[in-house]
Amino acid sequence: DASGRSVTVGNTPVVSDFGTGITITVLDAQHQVVSSETIDTVTKGNGGTLLANALGALVMPEEGGKVVVTGSDGWANNISGRAANALRALGLSHPLFTGTAQERRASDTLLVAVSEV
């Protein structure tokens, strides 16, 4: 979707988000949205801390559920080491986690990851 980001499971759109940064969406085993939150890691200097806190407070779904992480719009601008470690704990790896601040700010790389429980 050109005007935002969306998550579709099968043929069913489950999340449509127009915020900037990283969106964390938790789906249950039936692919119903349990929670969805967007953390502004683009314009907020403390975006990495906010993301790490949100991931730390994340309530994992029961078996069969999924955690879907999506990002766009320069999502890596304010990623902190703590946030990168929290994303790694979900099984996500990205070269920008170890890039310089200038490389992170210049990136428009789309981030999409799914962690199954």
Image: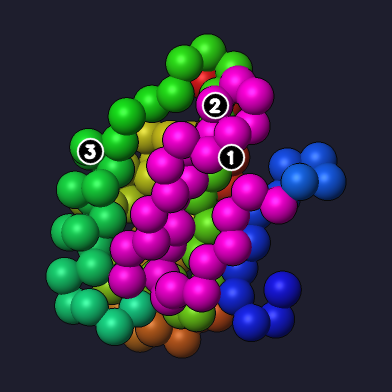
**Secondary structure mostly seen in the magenta stretch:** strand
Q: In the rendered structure, which disc, 1 or 2, sits on the residue that comes first in sequence?
A: 2
Residue range corresponding to the magenta coloring: 13-40
On the rendered image, what quadrant is the N terminus found in?
A: bottom right
User: x, y (%) of residue 61?
Assistant: 44, 23
Q: Amino acid at mark 3?
A: Gly
- Report whether residue 56 is seen: yes
**Residue drawn at 53 percent across, 57 percent down:** 70
User: x, y (%) of residue 92?
Assistant: 49, 43
User: x, y (%) of residue 81?
Assistant: 24, 55
Residue 28 numbered tag: 2
Specify few, some or many for label 2: CA neighbours under 10 Å numbering under 14, 14-19, or 20 or more: some
Q: Amino acid at mark 1?
A: Val
Specify few, some or many for label 1: CA neighbours under 10 Å numbering under 14, 14-19, or 20 or more: some
Residue 114 numbered tag: 1
User: Quarter-wise, where is residue 64 in the image?
Assistant: top right
Calculate the distance from the C-alpha at mark 1 to the C-alpha at mark 2. Answer: 13 Å
Residue 105 numbered tag: none
